[in-house]
Image: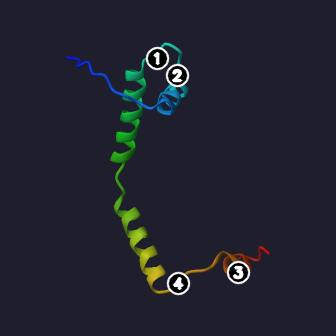
Amino acid sequence: MPVEATIRVAPEVKGRLDKLKKYPQETYNEVIDRLTRDALEEAAEELTEEDIRDIEEAIEDIKAGRVYTTKELMRELGID
């Protein structure tokens, strides 16, 4: 059962919501629903075990000083 509520938004927020409408008659409720569903789906994307291992390895490399500056990497790759 839908609940009706009034919310206050700043004019610039309303302007952004207007720009995010997929079609002129799309309601603000539909825009907000779509945006929040998309955000929740994105947030739910979990890292794989491989992703976590890669991140941990990268952190260890940084801690151990196994890093290159951009200039060093460019020189190493022959991109000057």
Q: Residue at x 49, y 13 (%)?
A: 25
* Residue at mark 4: 66
Q: Residue at x 38, y 69 (%)?
A: 53
What amino acid does circle 4 point to? Arg
Horizontal and vertical percent position of residue 7:
33, 26
Mark 4 and mark 2 lie on one chain; the one further toward the N terminus is: 2
The alpha-carbon separation of the residues under discs 4 and 3 comes to 14 Å
* Tags 1 and 2 touching, CB below 8 Å: yes
In the rendered image of this protein, does residue 29 appear above or below residue 66?
A: above
User: Depth-wise, is mark 4 or mark 2 nearer the camera?
Assistant: 2
* Residue at mark 3: 76
User: Depth-wise, is mark 4 or mark 1 nearer the camera?
Assistant: 1
The alpha-carbon separation of the residues under discs 3 and 1 comes to 53 Å
Horizontal and vertical percent position of residue 34:
40, 29
User: Is 12 situated left or right of 2 in this image?
Assistant: right
Give the structural element (helix, strand or loop) at label 1: loop
